[in-house]
Amino acid sequence: MSKDSFAGFHPVINMLYFVVVIGFAMFLMHPVCLTVSLFCAAAYSIYLSGKKAIRAGMLFMLPMLIFTALLNPLFNHQGGTILAYLPNGNPITLESIAFGIAAAVMLITVIAWFYCLNSVMTSDKFVYLFGRVIPALSLILSMSLRLVPRYNAQIKVIYDAQKCIGQNALNGNLLVKARLGIKILSILVTWALENAIETADSMKSRGYGLPGRTAFSIFSFQRRDIYALAYIFICFVTIIIGLLMGGYHFRYFPTIRGQWNGADTITIFAAYFALGILPLVINMKEDLIWKRIKSKI
């Protein structure tokens, strides 16, 4: 896994960025916006996880994209460009296919951005941001973010322990494997319940959530955070202006039609791309600086 320089920014910057990009990814259905957002999210995911992100994209994201794109024309028959008819007489339209592809791209893009959010926004950042305002919710969020990684690690520990006492899932028939799987699941659930109780007692003993409680924090707002905040704000305002001007307007029904205003449209799409590519640019810049320093050693 590559070292993520963007994750080293202040939690306010990280959280603000993901709120903005995920919000725009969910509501901007223009094909250019969908393409830009998907490219930026995929590129950042690959930078964070490398081959793991590519494998997840091929095994999970791509089938979901194809399934969602094919499912929409079977149930949505709107649109004026009829391509064929189903056996029940309902039409398959070009507009429904285009909307299905757009919805599928939007879905996997949002999932990719949430994957990046989960990698960047660690539990200590959530507690730092929301611990004083909504302490209970921040604790739940931080525990939820750690849920899957910790459970995966614990399942491996339990499975290795079972192998050491001769209970290997690779040996035996299907019934033996099912019994071992149920046993591992039971151990995992017991461990999870005990861990949740211990976490609750530990946080309670520390006075978590009590009025006037102070907390140690390693985060400080630096000059680079100010620059990043100004950058995000400029991109955000430009995109909002583009929305108000109708530059991102694109309709799929009853016919496919968008709007093009020349240089103004290029500007607002460039602002959207500049916003999405920000973490990757920061990381590439830091990587170049590090390589230059290493070459001088």
Image: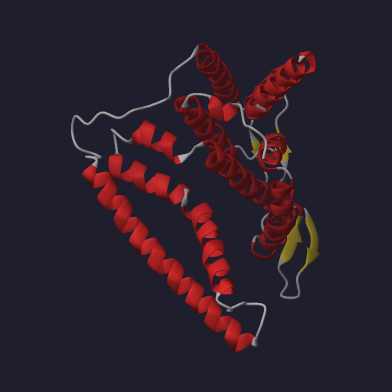
Say if residue 26 shows up in the picture: no
Q: Is residue 31 left or right of residue 200?
A: right
Image coords of residue 26 (percent x, y): 56, 41
Query: Which residue is nearer to you in this view: 265 or 199?
Result: 199
Name of the residue lying farthest toward the left: 211
Q: In terms of depth relative to the viewer, which is nearer, 155 or 212? A: 155
Instruction: Locate residue 64 relative to residue 224 in the image: left or right.
Output: right
Q: Quadrant of residue 243?
A: top right
Find residue 249 and report its horizontal and vertical position in percent: 63, 33
Q: How many marks?
A: 0
Q: Is residue 131 above or below residue 167?
A: above
The residue at the point 67 percent across, 78 percent down is 170
Q: Residue at x 22, y 45 (%)?
A: 205
Q: Nearer the viewer, residue 49 or 190?
A: 190
- Determine whether 258 is above or below 8 in the image: below
Residue 98 seen: yes
Name the colouring of the figure. secondary structure
Q: Looking at the image, which residue is at 63% across and 28% down? A: 279
Q: Which quarter shows the N terminus?
A: top right
Q: Quadrant of the C terminus?
A: top right
Front residue of 221 and 32: 221
Q: Residue at image x 65%, y 86%? A: 172
Q: In this rendering, would 211 be left or right of 255?
A: left
* Quarter-of-image position of residue 294: top right
Question: Residue 102: image x %, image y %?
Answer: 68, 47
Image position of 78 with respect to 239: above or below = below
In the displayed structure, 38 sits above or below 54; it is: above
